Amino acid sequence: MKRFLMIATLACAATATVHAAGAPAVDAPSCRVVKMADPGWTDIAATNALAGIVLESLGYEQKVLPLSVPITYAGLQKNQVDVFLGNWMPAQRTLVEPLLKSGAVEQVRANLPQAKFTLAVPEHVARAGVRTFADLAKHADRFQRRIYGIESGAPANAVIKKLLAAKSHGLEGWTLVESSEQGMLSQVARAARSNDWIVFLAWEPHQMNNTFKLVYLDGGAADFGPASVHTVTRKGYRAACPNASRLFAQIEFTAPLEHAIIADVTAKKDTARASALRQLKAQPALLERWLAGVTTLAGTDAKAAVLARLANP
């Protein structure tokens, strides 16, 4: 009898283990609020909006924190930020690699595998003969030996400072003009209107690719490398919140998807959230991939919850 009970107990335990292994992980209530960073970039506003709609449909609460990139990584280390969708690589390499190696931050996946991130010029400047990094030095006076970047402290600016310090591509005596994203683009707009010369930091996806006729310069791969955008989380987030982590491990965007939202926002046609909602309604196949094996915070069907939210926003 004792032997029978022991066998039965072991069998039940084994069955429970199998069911537990096969069952989706349900997050604790402490995972309900998902803190995400936004450096003020239009592409991250778009991706945060897409992720936020899904999270809130699943019973989570998205809290978006307006933080610069360096402060975002400090926040990840201090558990003040859970998830950041804007780890542009290799532009942020010097900032993020030490944190990845120490385990202070965890890189989840590339959420936009094929992006662009390098220097660009307006089309009229390219037509005049500037198509590579090497061409810049040949026309230094036309550019007033200036490269326009984004906000001070941004890792992308550090890449530009490094190549200027090394006098790469013959860029001796050049300076970086730091500004906000919008400040830089205002300079580009003025140059485009007056046919002046300007070289600036550019990336895709971004509305600048639709607003301006611009040409990305060749020859900067050693400085900027092939660009991709990654999702990173704070240390231990995957173990603490496995269900939300699974969602972020499966979220991947496309340039056309982000462009559509950015275009709506830039044209003041819609908010990022309203545009993202419309895009998700139009592309249900995205949800199939993003929600595979994911549940709501309460442990119920994720796809049904998101579709219900999309039907009744």
Image (cartoon, rainbow, N blue to C red):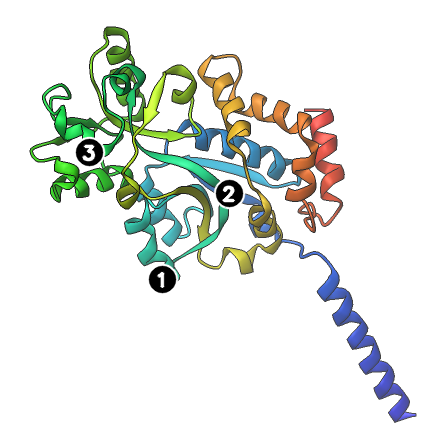
Quarter assignment of residue 201 = top left
Structural crowding at the residue carrying mark 1, measured as other residues with C-alpha within 10 Å and reported as few (<14), some (14–19) or many (≥20): few
Indicate which disc residue 101 carries. 1
C-beta proximity under 8 Å, tags 2 and 1:
no
Q: Position of residue 59 (x, y in %)?
A: 65, 40
Q: Disc 2 marks which residue?
A: 111
- What residue do we see at 39% from left, 50% from top? 76
Asked if 245 appears above or below 207 in the picture, the reply is below
Q: Amino acid at mark 1?
A: Lys
Give the label, 1 or 3, closer to the camera.
Answer: 3
Q: Amino acid at mark 3?
A: Ala
Indicate which disc residue 118 carries. none
Q: Position of residue 258 (x, y in %)?
A: 51, 28
- Looking at the image, which residue sits at the far right? 1
Asked if 274 appears above or below 118 in the picture, the reply is above
Distance between the Cα atoms at labels 1 and 3?
Answer: 35 Å
- What residue do we see at 73% from left, 40% from top? 303
Q: Disc 3 marks which residue?
A: 134
Does residue 13 appear left or right of residue 216 in this picture?
right
| Figure quadrant of the C terminus | top right
| Figure quadrant of the N terminus | bottom right
